[in-house]
């Protein structure tokens, strides 16, 4: 998983106290989106290659208890994170993004990464990330 530019700056500002930065406070809900191509570190909710907002696709929101507490520089999801059922084909999904806004096309990309096994999300599919499927490492 890769941290976005905005998240890297937030972490550095938190550690060194260079400037107050809103992202250094605990987040409320984080949102997860599915992407048809690789996002970039400078990505936003409007430019992250998210799958089209059709056929029931919505970002999913997570809360603090959905994540294991980091003890060795790694955070993973502690709950199964499920998207709504696809009411039509969403297409190929190769990456995921974690954003600070649940609204499609809005917000900042905080983290992103490839999906281990890319998939075509077809009508009737219910995409999900099993426990420990999403992880972030800070080295």
Image (cartoon, rainbow, N blue to C red):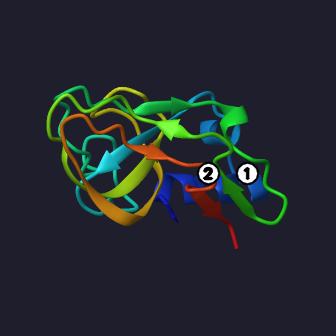
Cβ atoms under marks 1 and 2 closer than 8 Å: yes
For the C terminus, the quadrant is bottom right
Is 9 on the left-hand or right-hand side of 73?
A: left
- Give the labeled residue for mark 1: 14
Q: Secondary structure at mark 2?
A: helix
Mark 1 → mark 2, Cα distance in angstroms: 6 Å
Q: Position of residue 86 (x, y in %)?
A: 25, 33
Asked where in the image residue 76 lies, by quadrant, the reply is: bottom right
Which residue in the rendered view is the most extreme toward the bottom? 139
What is the residue that sits farthest to the front in this orientation? 124
Assess disc 2: are there few (<14), some (14-19) or many (≥20) residues with their C-alpha within 10 Å of its C-alpha.
Answer: many
For disc 1, the neighbor class at 10 Å (few under 14, some 14 to 19, many from 20) is some
Vertical relation: 35 (above or below) 66: below
Instruction: Return the residue at label 2.
Output: 10
Q: Residue at x 62, y 49 (%)?
A: 131
The residue sitting at 62% across, 36% down in the picture is: 22
Residue in the foreground of this view, choosing between 133 and 101: 133
Q: Is there any visible trace of residue 26 in the rendered image?
A: no
- Residue 60 at x, y = what percent? 44, 32
């Amino acid at each position: 998983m890769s941290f976005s530019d905005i998240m890297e700056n937030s972490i550095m500002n938190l550690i060194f106290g260079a400037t107050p930065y809103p992202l250094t406070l605990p987040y409320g809900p984080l949102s997860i989106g599915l992407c048809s191509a690789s996002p970039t570190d400078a990505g936003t909710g409007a430019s992250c290659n998210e799958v089209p907002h059709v056929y029931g696709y919505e970002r999913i929101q997570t809360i603090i208890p959905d994540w294991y507490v980091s003890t060795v520089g790694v955070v993973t999801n502690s709950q199964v994170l499920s998207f709504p059922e696809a009411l039509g084909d969403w297409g190929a999904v190769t990456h995921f993004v974690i954003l600070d806004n649940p609204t499609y096309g809005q917000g900042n990309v905080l983290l992103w990464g490839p999906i281990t096994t890319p998939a075509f999300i077809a009508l009737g599919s219910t995409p999900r990330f099993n426990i420990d499927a999403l992880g972030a490492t800070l080295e």
